[in-house]
Image: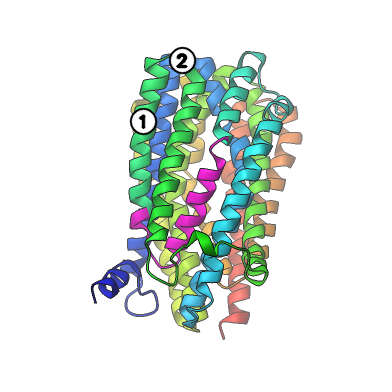
Amino acid sequence: MGKETKKVSRQMDMLHGGLFKNMLAMALPLAACSILQQLFNSVGVAVVGRFAGSEALAAVGSNGAVISLLVTLFSGISLGANVIIANYIGEGNDKKIPEVVHTAVTMALLSGALLLVLGQIVAHPILLLMGAPENVIELATVYLRIYFLGMPFMMLYDFGASILRSIGDTRRPLLALIFSGIVNVILNFLLVAGFHLDVAGAGIATVGANAVSATLVVLFLLHEEEPIRVSFKKLTINTFELGRILRIGIPAGLQGMVFSLANVCIQSSINSFGSDAIAGSAAALNFEYITYFIVNGFAQTTVTFTSQNYGAKLYDRCKKVFREAMLASILFCGSLSMIIVLGRDFFIQLYTTDPVVTKYAMIRLVIITTFEFLTSTYEISGGALRGMGHSMTPAILTVFGSCVLRLIWISTAIRVWHSYTLLISIYPISWVLTGAMVSTAYFITRKKLLR
């Protein structure tokens, strides 16, 4: 009886009762996971900037787009596992869930190993391709290669947390990130400030933190109740379930890859303004992540809630999930963005006191963070579509609206007017276009499916 009670306390009922309270209970811890992770990483960036100088800060900051480019495909695949498990829960088909779980964990191990090797090979060439400044590229290469040593841990955490989210459990992934984040901060101060290992110390600290979070999530799954309990003896790839996961996950992952590719191109343009612009952009980027993670938390919640209710054929609840998630995402993200923008003098000084670096950071923070809430329009709509099993449509539209448009902007407007402000302005412009397209696609698809 005790075990059954334990199981109920961890699995959220998404099919009955009020939605808004349960969605907040899932979305806010999800956002907190990402925000805390980013805050802990930001402490590492701040330690590098304070104790290793602006060149080291630029080296660490210039890697963000590259890391996203190589990681997002497999992170998208983990979303596919979430959707399939949640759909089976909605259908009441517990017998199929263990096959999905063990296929997902096996994929995590294989993809992590692949990324580890790939990262060592492409680190220096891709930074050269991006036009990283000569005074930064060697430090950036060292950091990137060390960072990718931790890819197996990162993939295990992503896939493991995705499995837990499918039953509405966001508390334990949050606890794992809190603990690993504390480890990250301690290691950064110890290795960067104490032993003066500069970017190498920051990279080692990140790998160590990822190892801690992955270990905790794996331990949770090893001792979880059926049907999502993991057993190493049962690790295998079920080709049918893998196909279902990939049909949802690959479009989401490719969207993220192309999205990151566009950001790599923008980072290359930022690089042309020198190391001060790179450092300032890296400092402001931390606050963009924090506000975006609010939106992403509600988007992931939309995926899981929609998938379970769609599997249970509760179509009116699917519509309500979309409405309430969209409203909450805009309100929460917009409120946090305004706090950051209004307090920008204080927040930027946490990362740098260099006046030139601060100028670039301020430009990026004001233009992008102010309008970050606009990402809700395509993230929530895309999450609802994926929850109904339609992953390719939002992927294609987001690639066009947020990626192709940015590449066109770089190759036309920025070549004519070499302006940092003009370069950054493409973000809110692309969000408006993408939001309009993906929202329209959602309503058209919903009309066909939810009759």
Q: Position of residue 401 (x, y in %)?
A: 67, 52
Which label lies toward us, 1 or 2?
1
Q: Would you place residue 259 above or below residue 146 in this image? A: below
Q: Position of residue 339 (x, y in %)?
A: 34, 40
- Residue ID for mark 2: 52
Residue shown at 51% from the left, 45% from the top? 154
Which picture quadrant has residue 126? top right
Amino acid marked by disc 1: Val
Circle 1: is it few (<14), some (14-19), or many (20+) Cα within 10 Å? many
In front here: 239 or 317? 239
The N terminus lies in quadrant: bottom left
In front here: 113 or 411? 113
Q: Secondary structure at mark 1?
A: helix
Whether 156 is among the magenta residues is yes
- Residue ID for mark 1: 185
- Predominant SS of the magenta segment: helix
Q: Would you place residue 324 above or below residue 17 in this image? A: above
Residue shown at 58% from the left, 57% from the top? 106
Residue shown at 74% from the left, 41% from the top? 408
The C terminus lies in quadrant: bottom right
Horizontal placement of 65 versus 351: left or right?
Answer: right
Circle 2: is it few (<14), some (14-19), or many (20+) Cα within 10 Å? some
Q: Give the Cα separation between the discs numbered 1 and 2.
A: 16 Å
Residue range corresponding to the magenta coloring: 149-172
Total tally of numbered discs in the picture:
2
Q: Position of residue 181 (x, y in %)?
A: 37, 38
Amino acid marked by disc 2: Ala
Horizontal placement of 382 versus 332: left or right?
Answer: right
Residue shown at 53% from the left, 38% from the top? 150
Which picture quadrant has residue 228? bottom left
Q: Is residue 62 visible?
A: no
